[in-house]
Structures are given as C-alpha cells and as structure tokens.
Image: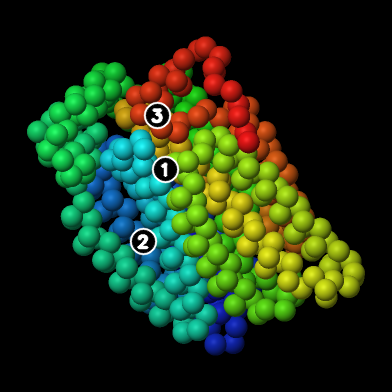
Amino acid sequence: MQFAWASSSIPKLLGNESYVTVTKEEAKWISNSYMIGDVVGGFFSFVIFNNISRKLSLYVSCLPVLASLVGILFANSTLVLYFARFIGGVGRNMNLVAIPMYIGEIANPEIRGALGTFTNIFINLGMICVTAITTYVSIRASAIVGVVVATTALALIHFVPESPYYLLMVSRKDDAKKSLQVLRQSKEVDKELDDLEVSIKKQMEQSESLVKKFSQLFTVRANLKAAFIAIFLKSLQMLTGVSVVIMHCHAIFEQATGSISPDVSTLIYYGVMFATCFFSTSIIDKFERRTLMVISCFLTWLVLTVQGIYFYLNMHGYDLTFLTWLSIFDLIFFSVAYRIGLGTVTFIMCSEIFAVNVKVAGVALSNVAFSLSSLIANIIFDYTEDSFGIHTPFWIFGGLAAVGAIFSAFVLPETKGKTLDEIQQMLASSKKRKEKNVIC
C-alpha cells in the first residue's frame, strides 16, 4: 500500500482540498523520503536480523510500517509526512529482507519459485487498495485500512512456524524437526532434516560477528558471486523504471493525454499488474530463470523505448490523437514484461543464492542496492522530466533493460530446481559453467 501511495496521494495533496498544504517541490520529497528510508532500512535489517530469529524478524519488520501509517493518518504538516514516509521506507526494506529470507528457507525447491511470487500478488493487491481508497474516499481512509492490515499481519505471524534452517543454526534440532513436520505436513522428515544439517554445517563459519559475516560476502568466492549477482539484479529491477511508474503512475497518464482519465488508467494498470502475478506464478517453475530474465528485459526495453518515442513526438507537436490508447496499452504490456522475469526471478534468486551464514548480510546488502537504485530512478525521472522532457527517463530505463538482457544471457547462473546446497556448490565452482546459455 505504501509503495503506490504517492501516485494517488500526491495529486490530492497538491489539490485545494488537501489536509496538509504541500508545494510541488515538497511533494517530490514526500515521495522520495520513502526511498531514503528504504536505504536506511537496509542497514537496520543487517544489524537487527543477524541477532534474532526469522519469525521475530517478521514481527519487527511490521512495526515501522504500522508507525508510518499512523503518522500519515494524523499528519498536520509536511514535516510529519516526510517522517512518516521515511519510517515506512525503513519498514519496506525490513520486509524485503525478512520475507524472502523466510520463504527461501521454508520452501521445497520444486515450489520455491511459485511460493515467492505470492509476495508480488499481495504487493499488487495493496497497490490497488490504496489507489482506489485514496482516489474515491481520502488519504486518511486509506491509512486507516493500512493500520488494520498491518495489525492483522502482526497477529497472524504468531501462527507461522520458525524457519528450520534458523533452528538448526542455533542447535535446536528437535524444534527444527517439529517445524519441518508442520511445513511439510508429514512426520517423515528425518532425511530432509539430516540433509539440511549437513548443508548448514558446510556453510557455517566459526566466527559469528557482524563484521565477519559481512566480510565473508567479499572473501569467500561463492558469497562474492552471489553478492554481485544479487546487487546487479536488484539494481536492474528498479533502474528499469518500475518504481517510477508505480509511484508516478497518475502523473504519467496525465501527460499521456489518453482517452481514459488518469485515475481510471492507474487502477487499470495496477489491476493488470495484479493479474500478471498469477500468470508469473504459473510459469516461474516451468521455465529456466535465465530464459525468463532475458525475455523480460528484452520486452521491457522494447516497450519503454516505444513509450519514450510517443512522449517525444507528443512533446514536439505531432498529432497523436489516433494513438490516445497507446500509453495505457504500452504500460500494461510493460507490467506483463516486467512480471515475467524482473519482477519475479530477481526476488526468488536473491532468496536462493546466499549461504545461511551470510544470508542476512547478503539480502540486506542487495536490498540497499535495490533501494538506492529506486531512489536514483525516481530522482532521474523527477529532474530529467523537468529539464529534457518525459521521454528522456523512459529511454534511459529502456537502455538499462537492454543491458540486463545481455547480463542475464551470459552471466546469470541457473538455479531452477536446485537445492540451496547445490546452488552454493555451483557458485563456489571455479570451472566454466557447463550448462548452455539457452535463452529461448
């Protein structure tokens, strides 16, 4: 809900009926303060989640989100909105560390991809919810709904089992067995439990200090490769413009001068993003991760380039009334292209490729890159749009998507169907990758 908050709320804040007086420049930083908090949240995640259980991490990650929504509900000045959005960004990053880490450790390899996409389903459901309520009711009404959702989440976390990986890490084998029995809905888990125990012993080092865990990301070959891949993928995910489109959706459709109102166009766009989550769930474990990434990046490059050309011609006075449908169609196609790989494979791979002893550090570091890239992408959009025209950021993001297609084809490892231990062995290998780079 908070990710898409700016798209529908900023126009309201700039209107005559706003409950807080806001200038256009202040509105930019109300939006961007969320991404700044996202960056800071990465460092909090690294320090806090190294010292607590996976289940407690889920609890902790809910608290800043709840505090942010309460702040938005009772805000009486721009300063309060800055702070509330900042705190919400901290919570966002904590969620993006805690949730993938938990999912990666509880899921069977065969369903890990599909299970990971459920996060995207609920992200998009929240985007639709906040946009509809803010557009047709009020900003404060959407904040009330958010408070209810966050409070419900805090209550429901009580019922999820602790990660068996974490329990084995802290020498609680009996509890790990019970947890695994709940997760697998079977009493016969001894073989899997033994395999997990052997895998964790291989990956754990003697030193458990925060500095040691972080340094191991750069001194152990497998960890270094995992960190490089995760940082690149997370940066690419945001630098292809998805956060910009989500957070500026209303403004983009307003400039596109389409035949459908910006409010309705925004809801249609978020609705399609929600629907494509189910499509991605059905294909994520049927095709190679690398194949999906190449296709996703190529189609994203194509659609962003076309949208940039449309804005360029429109800005220079060409009569495009016969193409009023193009922007909504183009951005809908963008959501499909993004969801095929960039929006799902990136999330899943970053939960798969880190060894357990550096998982928190690795996921937190990659999410700092994710947050910084999102902030950079939003700043690029805000200021290149004003200086050079709205087509410019679309061409920049499209070019970066093309780079992502090349990287995915020739550098990205294939993790589909592999256990976490097999992935670590593959990353640690110094031999040239044997599998073919099949991209279609």
Extreme residue toward the left, this view: 174
- Regarding mark 2 in the picture, which secondary structure is present there? helix
Q: Are marks 1 and 3 in contact (CB under 8 Å)?
A: no
Question: How far from the left and from the top, in percent, is residue 182?
Answer: 16, 45
Between the C-alphas of marks 2 and 1, the distance is 26 Å
> Which residue is more in the foreground, 276 or 346?
276
Quarter of the rendering containing residue 120? bottom left
The residue identified by callout 3 is 418
Judge whether 73 appears above or below 332 on screen.
below
Q: Residue at the spot x=55%, y=52% of the render?
A: 339
Which amino acid, by three-letter code, is at mark 1? Gly
Say which quadrant the N terminus sits in. Answer: bottom left
Q: For the image shown, how many numbered marks are present on the structure? A: 3
The front one of 141 and 37 is 141
Task: Give, as a three-letter code, the residue at label 3.
Answer: Lys
Q: Is residue 381 above or below residue 294?
A: below
Name the disc covering residue 174, or none.
none
Task: Identify residue for label 2.
Answer: 65
Residue 338 placement, left or right of 166: right
Mark positioned earlier in the residue sequence (2 or 1):
2
User: Badge 1 local density, few (<14 within 10 Å), some, or many (20+)?
Assistant: many
Tell me where residue 407 sits by quadrant.
Answer: top right
Rendering coords of residue 248 (x, y %): 61, 65
The residue under label 1 is 113
